[in-house]
Image (spheres, helix red, strand yellow):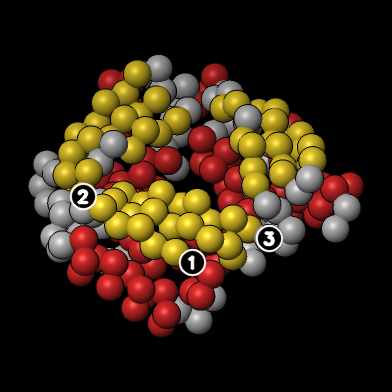
Amino acid sequence: MLDTELRRHVLDELDFDPSLDARNIGVTVQNAIVTLAGHVGSYAEKYNAERATQRVKGVRGIVEEIAVRVPSSALTDDGKLAKRAADVIAWDASLPPDAVKVKVQNGWVTLSGTVDWQYQRTACESAVRRLSGVVGVANLIAIKPHLSAVDVKASIDRALQRSAEIESRNITLNVSGGAVTLQGGVQSWHERDAAQRAAWSVPGVTSVVNRLVVG
């Protein structure tokens, strides 16, 4: 696919997504690597723009340079924003009380603490990302290790093989403790994300480095 055609497809997907206002997002493409620039009004829109681009067939990589410009009507004092973030996390029944700490500086939210599962870590970030006034999120939440490296690798291998979304023959796993690195090639960003989700779903995984190449 030509870069010009891919650019058109990305622009169409951004315009099609009702969760973001793409009027101020610029798109350039070189060798199927998409660069997103410009600005949006919230961190959630910035995130959704990247996810929309990943859905487009033919995209091999993304350089995300979108700035968040929070409207004056949505600007929130750091103290109030920290309380809102702490509250939405506390409302999640799957999290142990006081497992996650929140710090806010100039609209940037930093999450820290320790949880048992990746889905809990992801849920915290997802909840905070949608809050009005947030310009960025640093997720420093750690995951408690549960299994040996050998058990982790075997469990991920089985998870990849079970998934109808993944062609696992071209994926190589490297496991050190609970740290997992995915290497090899996949056919789409969807398959790349599915492999990462499969790795994170295994107890004992504390980090995943996704080096899978699309194309």
State the SS at label 2. strand
Residue 40 x %, y %: 63, 32
Q: CA distance from mark 3 to mark 1?
A: 13 Å
| Residue at figure coordinates x 10%, y 47% from the top left | 97
Residue bearing the label numbered 2:
143
**Disc on the earlier residue, 3 or 2:** 2
Q: Amino acid at mark 3?
A: Gly
Is residue 127 positioned above or below 105 on the image? below
Q: CA distance from mark 2 to mark 1?
A: 24 Å
Residue bearing the label numbered 1:
171
Q: Amino acid at mark 1?
A: Ile
State the SS at label 1. strand
**Disc on the earlier residue, 2 or 1:** 2
Q: Quadrant of the C terminus?
A: bottom right
In front: label 3 or label 2: 3
Whether residue 171 is visible: yes
Residue 20 x %, y %: 64, 44
Answer left or right for 150 relative to 134: left
Residue 137 x %, y %: 40, 34
